[in-house]
Image (cartoon, helix red, strand yellow):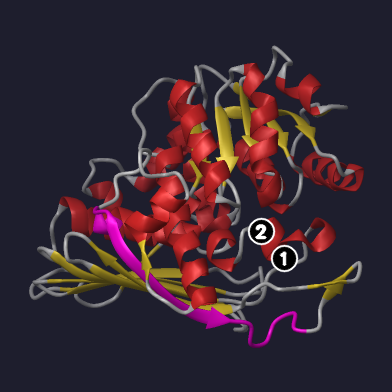
Amino acid sequence: MSKKFYDENSADLVARINDLTGHQDEIFNFLIIGSGMIGREHMRVATLLGGARVHGIYDTCEESMDFAEAEFKKYSEEELVRYESLVSGCMDPKIDVILICTPNFTHYEVLSNVARSGKPLFVEKPMATSLKDGAEILKFSDDYPAFVQIGMQYRFKAQYLDAFHEVKKLKSLGDIKTISMSEYRPPFLDKVKQWNKFNEFSGGTFVEKCCHYFDLINLMADSPALNVYASGGRAVNFLDFEYKGRKSDIDDHGFVIINYSNGIRANFTLNMFSNEFYEELVVTGERGRLVASENASIDKRKKSRSAITVEVLGHPYYEEYEIGYPEHVEKSGHHGATFFEQAALINKLQNKNEDAATPKQGLEAMLIAGAAQKSLIENKVINISEYAKQNGLGDLLSVT
């Protein structure tokens, strides 16, 4: 259990989970657009959480809806509506909130079409595949009558909640000097029409896979980025892969260096030809070092392991301290992070204050990711201010 974070916020983790999954005064009806892997995860979590009901689904792929409906019937007795069109779903007065879980390259178009509903929206990461579309989403959200939440669920992983609590609230490290993140994992999974094997449809590996991490680094640094340099490419995965005669061009590894205007230096490492999943955040300050890590297996029967270490003299967690969520929450998806991400969504629907990712933060993560993609291709340092202005973001984001 992530005992430290919740104890120091005067709330026990188990009690909080019981409260979230217990009786709810108001149940919100979800429409899940896109019934692929992440859409089905949101369906499972909503059923477990209990504060929402999956009222209906829509997908242009009938096979995906068949699979999602069959899975849904295994854990829920609720009736599931299969909408015949996007418009019929989003304009149904029974729907309270719309979750966009479609492939990356469709997010902007789908959001543009459901906007007429005026209902609260949840958009999976990345919010778009281009900075131009991301900027349009941000401008749209400023005038939209309801909120738009971006699916940066890694913020809700147990080890990162604890890390931010230690660094930002308790100031355990003093002033932050460096931030380092890494992910080692197996290759991209199979998706409908293999869209994630192509830069055009995914936005590129740094956008598709790494915007979670750039979001965390941005939050930890809490300062505008000055410049980005990246190196990476294609070494092992999908070198000979083709789909309908088109060759894959997706990268499978990379290194990124980010300099922030407050003097913090950060780096990110990605490797996608490892056999198991491992990710780590290392934050170093004037007093010492914090390490937050997670190990997970391709064998879904094995429980993941998360831990935190705070190497500050006298700190109770100077030695590694294992944290995490109860097994039923962890197994619901992304090691329990999606559960608390949806809890944040329901809190926002109840007009409660909640710290969830905004379109502005989603675009800031995309800005770093896009600059990294550009740096990788051009083999040069990318000035963030110039890059933002080139993409029409100068007036939308605070860059120096």
- Disc 2 crowd, CA 10 A, few/some/many (<14, 14-19, 20+): many
User: What number of labels is visible?
Assistant: 2
What amino acid is at disc 2?
Ser
Q: Secondary structure at mark 2?
A: helix
Q: Is residue 222 magenta?
A: yes
Q: Are marks 1 and 2 in contact (CB under 8 Å)?
A: yes
Mark 1–mark 2 distance (CA, rounded to whole Å):
6 Å
Q: Position of residue 224 (x, y in %)?
A: 27, 54
Q: Is residue 26 magenta?
A: no
Q: Position of residue 32 (x, y in %)?
A: 70, 35
The residue stretch that appears in magenta: 220-239
Q: Looking at this view, is 45 or 360 the one in front?
A: 360
Q: Relative to 77, is 146 above or below? A: above
Q: Looking at this view, is 117 or 51 the one in front?
A: 117
Residue 328 in view, yes or no: yes
Q: Which residue is mark 1?
A: 198
Q: Is residue 158 toward the left or the right of residue 308 in the image?
A: right
Q: Residue at x 45, y 47 (%)?
A: 363
What amino acid is at disc 1?
Phe
Q: Relative to 22, is 206 above or below? A: below
Q: Which residue is mark 2?
A: 202
